Image (cartoon, grey):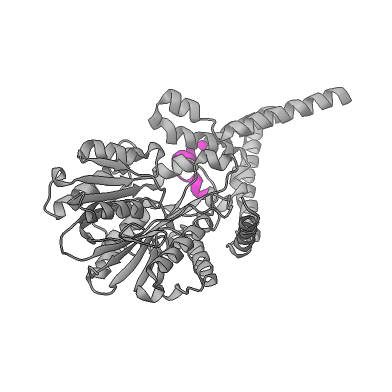
Amino acid sequence: MDVKQQKINKEYQIYVQRKMPKSNLLRDCIFAFLVGGIICTIGQAVSNFGKSYFNLNTEEASAFTAIVMIFIGALLTGLGVYDDIGKYGGAGSVVPITGFANSIVAPAMEFKKEGYVFGVGAKLFSIAGPVLVYGISASVLVGLIYFFLK
Amino acid sequence: MAKYRLGGQTVKLENPPCILSRATIVGSKEGQGPLGEYFDIVLDDNLWGEKTWEKAECRMYQEAARMAIARAGKQPQDINYLLGGDLLNQIITANFAARVLGIPFFGLYGACSTLTESLSLGAMLVSAGYADLALCVTSSHFCTAERQYRFPLEMGTQRPPTAQWTVTGAGAFLLSNDAKPPYITHVTTGRVIDYGITDNNNMGAAMAPAAAATIKAHFEDTRQGPEAYDLIVTGDLGWFGRELTIDLLKKEGYDISDRFIDCGCEIYSRDQDTHAGGSGCGCSAVVLGAYILRKMEEGIYKRVLMLSTGALLSTTSCQQGESIPGIAHAITIDMDRG
């Protein structure tokens, strides 16, 4: 590319950046905080319920909570509600475990039409896959560091 | 220079073909928009009773084609050429519809610019005497495009303000040599322009330079300015891309702002939460077929410069960090044969 075209491109990109409508960061943060907070509060309530009603210990209660929250996330995805929550909640609905459930159930529903092997099977982790790869890799790395420093 | 060429990018058609008949089908969201009453068919359900979104889109394509043929009192075997395309990989909508329609077929891909690409080629075929009847059909579908280019539908994601909404719609146009306005008088073929935009949620910015370049080339080739047109229409730049195009052309000394609309801005109302507006090759097809040509027949517009704009990206090119090339093709639609 010649220098003149590079200059035109640069100018245009700066101009576009300056002029383009931006997301309202403050509003998005507040919504993310509220939606994420509500989801986590529900999670806490589930955990407390498990502890008092089923007499679960802390470890059992967290497994119980994860199972219930994943179920709720998957159910709301299937009912077509979770994408509406995500539209407003943003990171607030993506980060909690319900968001993880959504990212697996959504492609499962979408790609069922391509069959159970190359559709559901192959596409199930198309969005959650990278999270798993880097999440597990990071935990192994942290585990190793912890092992040697201990 | 070839006999009917004007300048570098424009052809003045020797025998301007007419748009003999047309048909439009849209999805429910488009039907609820401000142009809802103009469309021929509005679907209640975007699956239209089919098993997959792709089948539904293909059926929209076929039905629009059949409707346009029937309205002109013709049969599919009377049509010499079917030209068209869609947004899906290997243009399966158009290919599969052509399998059923049985008309000699040229499959085209120009992303969202496919509408004016097919009308340009169809008009040249008819004008040159290679065809009596040429049918140009394009379609897009929100759900098929979304799953191919972005995320599954039920995925809870946030769309940025510059994101556009793929129109569910199909439009068909039958071109012939009859003396029945409106006519396609000029064809300006766009160059691929890339100003280095890489954000695939900002197609308007990627396509605006192409739109501006084609409009400028058209003005220069025909030695006319914006005042020669009652309306200048682009396909799917959206609100932001429309603004950029006005600015880019102002820099070149053309002010089109008082007669410039974008189909992506017209098809949805702002409260339909589509962010920057509509997109897809169905967008310009249904707005041209349902609204603009109707207004021309009613005498409101006499001469219209119609462009469709395409963003020539793929999911692979985006992931590999390539910038998004844009293209825009223009045709002049005139109530006089010239």
Q: How many marks?
A: 0
Residue for point 65% across, 52% down: A33
Lateral position of residue B118 relative to residue B128, left or right? right
Task: Please check the rendered image and state whether residue B173 is part of the magenta-colored stretch, yes or no.
Answer: no
Residue for point 26% across, 42% down: B59
Res A55 seen here: no
Residue for point 51% across, 67% down: B243
Is the residue B297 above or below the residue A42 in the image?
Answer: below
In the displayed image of the protein, which residue is found farthest to the right? A149
Lateral position of residue B283 relative to residue B316, left or right? left
Nearest the eye: B97 or A84: B97
**Residue range highlighted in magenta:** A72-85
Residue for point 60% across, 65% down: A19
Nearest the eye: A8 or B60: A8
Q: Position of residue A59 (x, y in %)?
A: 70, 28
Nearest the eye: B100 or A51: B100
Classified by dominant secondary structure, the portion drawn in magenta counts as helix
Lateral position of residue B20 relative to residue B58, left or right? left
Quadrant containing the C terminus of chain B is bottom left
In the displayed image of the protein, which residue is found farthest to the front? B1
Quadrant containing the N terminus of chain B is bottom left
In the figure, residue A138 lies in which quadrant? top right
